[in-house]
Image (cartoon, grey):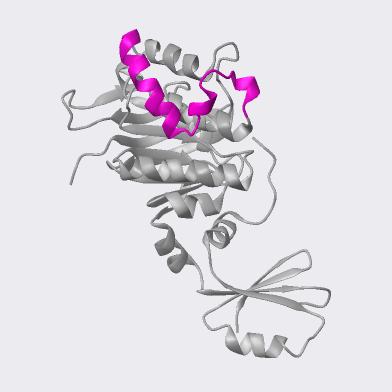
Amino acid sequence: MNPPLLQIRGLTKHYGSAVVVDDLSFEIAPGECLGVIGPNGAGKTTTLRMCLGLTAPDAGDISYFAGGEDRGLRMPDDALAIKARLGVVSQFDTLDPDFSCAENLQVYGRYFGMKAAQVRARVPALLEFASLSHKAGSKPGELSGGMKRRLSLARALVNDPSLLLLDEPTTGLDPQARHLMWERLQLLLQQGKSILLTTHFMDEAERLCSRLLVLDHGKKIAEGKPRELIAQHLEPDVVEVYGNGALAARVEVSGETVFFYTQDARPLLDQLAAHGSLRTLHRPANLEDLFLKLTGRQIREDA
């Protein structure tokens, strides 16, 4: 088995008396996409910031590229050497508004010490990958939200990294833009890239991630392949019942909707058919059900 590209051991971070990341351990193998999911304040972004050397951990070890020529690099001691081999897309737009799309890529490549001719040679392929060839001379202010995110992804690929760290890369995008972004990320995985992805979208996590890490209050509460986690923690069938008076199966209530989690939905559906005023939806259990079971339905404000 190939050594991990990223290995985290006992990572811990406090802000005052609050434990934001609590003794967290995980690793990323070559060629896999590890998704990190959890409610607001679970510690996802803080974990990513520590992995990038932007926030200092109080305890724990962060190492990259074990088994390579360097025999492994440690953050923050080897921060420059690590960042030279990473691709990063943050939650927020960090594109330079004064430069065109092509210039954003060219300038970013120079930060890695790449020669101007070398960067220029890579720009057309990166713009094509991002479906932005026709926008090469446009500035970020002239782009849609989806175009900006794809340009940020293309910029993260300037140095041809083997590992990408993506913090909620599709937040704020419409469905079409999200799907195009997913296509690009799947293409990178097919090319052998590895991805660490934080996301609030369960369909995104299930679509892209070969393995998931579920965080809550800074602690790892589950880890595994998406479908295996669903099978481990949930009944296979879900029946949603809507309407006043909707009150066998595990039951959860949210507003005027009742969720029945059951091994066999047919007897329940037969009983509900007698109540013509109720609407029902029968579906298989999904990753959103898992998320809500493990972390709860209560809304949390941003931490």
- Residue 140 location, quadrant: top right
The question of residue 123 being in magenta is answered with: yes
**As drawn, 245 above or below 103:** below
Residue 239, compared with residue 23, is above or below; it is: below
Farthest-out residue, front: 134
Does residue 301 appear left or right of residue 106 in this picture? right
Q: Percent from the top left, x then y, of residue 256?
A: 79, 68
Looking at the figure, which quarter contains the C terminus?
top right
Residue 247 visible in image: no
Q: Is residue 48 magenta?
A: no
Residue 73 horizontal side relative to residue 281, left or right: left
Q: Main secondary structure of the magenta part?
A: helix
> 274 and 123: which one is in front?
123
What range of the chain is rendered magenta?
Answer: 115-143
Q: Residue 178: percent from the left, percent from the top? A: 56, 44
Is residue 10 among the parts visible in the rendering? yes
Task: Give the mark count.
Answer: 0
**Does residue 75 appear to the left or right of 92 in the view shown?**
left
From the viewer's side, name the closer residue of 187 and 15: 187
Residue at 70% across / 49% down in the picture? 299
**Residue at 78% across / 86% down in the picture?**
275
Picture coordinates of residue 61 (x, y %)? Answer: 33, 30
Examine the rendered structure and indicate whether residue 123 appears above or below residue 196. above
* Quadrant in the picture for residue 147: top right
Image coords of residue 251 (percent x, y): 65, 73
Q: Residue at x 45, y 22 (%)?
A: 56
Tell me which residue sits at (59%, 18%) in the image: 139
- Against 278, is 163 above or below? above
